[in-house]
Image (tube, rainbow, N blue to C red):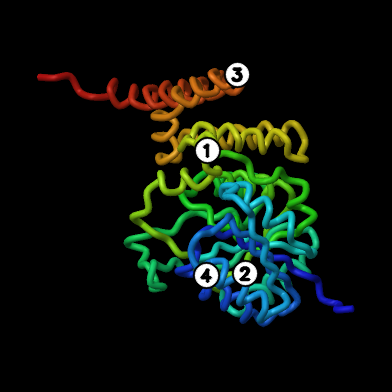
Amino acid sequence: MNATPLVGIGMPVHNAGRYLREALDSLLAQTYSHFELAITDNASQDETQAICREYSKRDKRVRYHRSDRNLGAVRNFRRAFELSRGEYFAWAAHDDLRAPRFLELCVAALEARPEAVLCCTGIRIIDSDGQDIPESIWPPTTRPVTGSRRDRIRALARARYWYDFYGLARRAALLRTRPPQLVWGFDVVVLTELLLEGDVVYVPDDLLLYRVFPHKQQSDVLHGLTGPGEDLVHTSWSELTAELLTAIGRAPVPLRERLMLELDLLVHFASRNELVRRGIRDDGFPSARRAFARGQPLRGTELAALALGVVVARRLQRVPATLSRPKDR
């Protein structure tokens, strides 16, 4: 038997032909070889199926699973995890790349820190052609990779991008979190629940090449989260905030700490994170109405309270500036 721990990698795909070969090559070139790659195909209609079958025949570590119908991205991410095995697990996007030592260094870091549930690495941001994107165009963001549980939640709340969903996690810790939820920002929810399970270890080397598409529209993402014919998931910062509060509410921490974490999230995510605050201001009340229409009065009340709180807090912040102005002369 192989004495090294088995790593499971889950790659959800749908019409992924353009970047798929490059992503697969980067995984199969890993210096740490004791892993399995489970590809879950959401009924792709391009060359994705042919590429996946080619690679599964070439390398026995690649296992290809094709759905008869498009389940939507959220369920496909769930399926990628459910069909994988191993002590450690990572989701892999079909258009991202991993440096050859990604698994080697992440496994070593987690083996050295039994209390850690997630290993994150340095990141390079690349464009559609694989070229580095300068910080002036895609600025860095805070990352929840160091410090206490409270430090990590604050860093997550202040962020604008949440790359560490694609880190290497302990499967046992992921099994204690909820599977990806049918909500816009499901990856942030999973990451939050994982951060609450234990410590994070950080490898500073730039081992994840994260591909971004600056001109991609939110509608492009939303239409892929659920399957055809299902109700669309709406862009809703307020619903995401509510799910993050739910994540904290179910965390395995003492009540006092849980309350402090919820307060931190409200302060640093819903109030001080300008991107989120604007989003809640715009979508809070429409999201509340949708929740009431779905027969979810408690969630509707929560969403309305979030929106009202953002509006009131914003107005209160403006009061001192108004009162301190000198009189008109």
Location of mark 4 (residue): 20
Earlier residue among tags 2 and 1:
2
Residue tagged 3: 295
- Check the image and report above or below for 98 versus 198: below
Considering only order in the chain, which callout, 4 or 3, is on the residue closer to the N terminus? 4
> Which sits in the foreground, 224 or 240?
224
- Most foreground residue, 15 or 86: 15
Callout 1: helix, strand or loop?
loop
- Considering only order in the chain, which callout, 3 or 2, is on the residue closer to the N terminus? 2
In the foreground, 142 or 94: 94
| Residue contact at pointers 3 and 4, CB within 8 angstroms | no
Residue drawn at x 60%, y 55% is 165
**Quarter of the image where the N terminus is located:** bottom right
Residue 201, image x, y percentages: 67, 63
Relative placement, left or right, of 56 versus 162 is right
User: In the image shown, does 329 or 111 lie closer to the viewer?
Assistant: 111
Q: CA distance from mark 4 to mark 1?
A: 27 Å
Residue 25 is situated, as x and y percent measured from the top left of the image, at 57, 78
Q: Amino acid at mark 3?
A: Gly
Check disc 1 and report the residue beneath it: 229
Q: Residues within 10 Å of mark 3 (few under 14, many from 20)?
A: few
Structural distance between the alpha carbons of marks 2 and 1 = 42 Å
Number of marks in the rendered image: 4
Label 4: element kind: helix
